[in-house]
Image: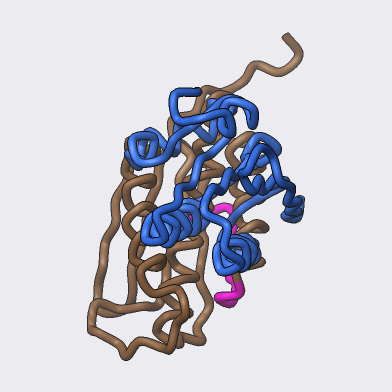
Chain colours: A brown, B blue
Amino acid sequence: MPTVRLAFTSAPRYVRTARLVGVAMARRAGVADELLDEVRQAVGEACGRAVARHQRHGIQELIRVEMTDDGPYTVRVIDACGAAPCPKAAGEGGDDDEDTDRMADTLLAGLVQDLQIRSGPEGTEVTMVWPVRRRSYGR
Amino acid sequence: MELSLATREVAGHTVVEVRGEVDVYTAPELRERLLEIIDGGATRVVVDLRPVDFMDSTGLGVLVGALKRLRMAEGDLSLVCDSEKLLKIFRITGLDRVFALHESVEAATTGPAAG
């Protein structure tokens, strides 16, 4: 059961909000400080990937982000771009888009040790898990 | 932090200083600026990433796109970067072998042997 849920349209400006919340939650969950930059980058990549997929295929539905800090810190980013091919909306990025997609996947794989990307008819779910070390307050 | 861009000429190179966050929201602005510069005839372009606080794969995609366009025009794109956080994403994506990465604008603009 996620402790925080976000849902946003595929407007790129909301990716920053998701990054900020993702890092704040990670800190609260007890993820080590030296991993917070990786959390920020990975949440940004996963959400940016979802935004790009929604925009490219003209999908109006919301992108969902679920964060769970009960146990290892878990972030799920769920898009509504299913495995079935949808028509591509007109884009201007061209080759740059393909490079970006490749690099987003490479970065996710390189940054997150516990990563799963599952695609189904409803959409794609990126699940990222980070270990936590509970802090002893008042030390 | 929003993106801000400043362009200046240094030793025959066009240097673009990028400040703030380069992500899926702001990267189109950087793409537009680099295209303007390349379309304007610049062939030696340096992008100074030292004041960048965050960059995602969209930003990397823009830099790769600019490099490809410059190479077609027999030009080149160099980067200035001294942040371990950013260097790490260049290493993970293998782009540290694609771009000339320098620690200072001076090193990036003083010839191919520099940096």
Image point (65%, 34%), residue name: B50
Asked whether A139 or B1 is in front, the reply is B1
Q: Is residue A14 magenta?
A: no
Instruction: Locate the C terminus of chain A and report the quarter of the image it occupies.
Output: top right
- Most distant residue in the front direction: B12
Residue at figure coordinates x 69%, y 39% from the top left: B10
User: Would you say A49 lies left or right of A98 here?
Assistant: right
Q: Residue at x 35, y 41 (%)?
A: B98
Q: Which residues are magenta?
A: A1-11
Residue B3 vs A72, above or below: the answer is below
Give the image location of residue B112, x and y in percent.
Answer: 45, 30
Residue B28 visible in the snapshot: no
Which residue: 49% across, 47% down? B77
Q: Is residue A53 left or right of residue B55?
A: left
> Within the image, what quadrant is residue B95 found in?
top left
Residues A62 and B8: in front is B8
- Look at the image and say whether residue A5 sits in the magenta stretch: yes
Q: Nearer the viewer, residue B89 or B9?
A: B9
Instruction: Determine whether A128 is above or below A72 in the image.
Output: below
Q: Position of residue A58 (x, y in %)?
A: 45, 87
Indicate the position of residue B27 as horizontal and vertical percent values: 59, 61
Rendered view: A35 above or below A1? above
Above/below status of A1 relative to A33: below
Q: How many marks?
A: 0
- Which residue lies most toward the top here? A139
